[in-house]
Amino acid sequence: MQTFNSTPLHVQLLKIINGPRPKSAIALIIQDDGSLENPGQVILDDFSAEEFKSNKIFYNGDSIYDLWVSPAGDIWACSSFGNVYTTADVNFPDNPIRSGYNLDHDRIRNSGYNWKMYTLDAVQNGVRIWSPDGVNIFVGTYSGHVYLWNGTTWTKQETPTSEKEGKYIYHFAGTAVNNVFAIGNHATELHHYNGTKWEPTAFDRFTHGSLAPSGLLQHPDGFCYLACEGGRIWKTRDGQQFELVVQDPELNISSMAYAHDKIIIAAGEKGVFTIQDEQLVNLRNTFNAVQVSGSGNQAVFIRPEKESEDKITVAYAVYCSSPEKPWLGYSFHYAK
């Protein structure tokens, strides 16, 4: 449990992901004043030992929007001001575009990580960052473009969303750099990248339902799974043929992840579900599961923030492999 003295108008726990080591998690917390300049704090929580440790590992006033951690433990982040930050051992090329942000902030210098920075475009909002292999990094933007880092250079890519002046690339999933799916255009379209270009798929929101913004995951069975409105989960291999896996019209699916050798589903007020024998099975209904991320034997869930007269509390829950305490809860308290 952590307490921070600050005076935000609103505090939001935007994302929780598995950390760079077992039994750790990274929290992206936004202090939102209603403008684009919402600084994001990246906090590493380590609960692998008996004593819980929490450290702020990134904060430079930039508006961090998304995080991704590689299997090797490299951290990648993107911001609303078109900046990409990473702890990976990379050499970014010289960039003529200058950013108003840098890596001189105390909380970056003292974080214990060697951060690098690259500015994609001064007018781009980096809203999603992801990689299939830890080398090729995809960054989705507000304009619907995708930026791809191949380990040497950055390439700006058009997508069906950017070509129609749609908004946002919400989410990525895939098996390799030549087989990537992405959600675009206000969560109504599914795109596929074949290693050369982005193309529309046969996904039809009138047939399949609008996509949940985070309802996309790659399964070890080779299928890409999609969560849609109406509690429907579809799967596809190629983006052309879709098979309905399960359906519950009363279930509001907000996010999915693959952990504990199964699909883990965040379903809001109804809690946590999984798929078993082609049925939706409830795993936990004692908390509101806003979002889930995970891999291996750990899944982490965002819980809704709470506000009292003197503080704002943001919290998350961990579903781990511990037989003694499979479910653990952690909170951050911000003084008002």
Image: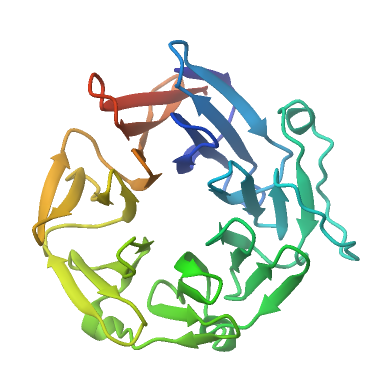
Res 10 seen here: no
User: x, y percentage for residue 198?
Assistant: 54, 84
Quadrant of the rendered image containing residue 123: bottom right
Q: Quadrant of residue 99?
A: bottom right
Percent x, y of residue 326 = 25, 27
**Relative to residue 204, is residue 95 depicted above or below?**
above
Query: Which is nearer the eye, 257 or 104?
Result: 257
Taking the image as shown, residue 246 lies to the left or right of residue 123, namely left
Q: Horizontal and vertical percent for residue 77? A: 63, 50
Q: How many marks?
A: 0
Front one among 89 and 280: 89
Tell me the quarter of the image containing the N terminus: top left
Q: Is residue 128 at all visible to an observer of this figure?
A: yes
> At 25% across and 57% down in the image, what residue appears?
253
Side of 331 where 230 appears, left or right: left
Residue shown at the point (58%, 44%) measured from the top left = 72
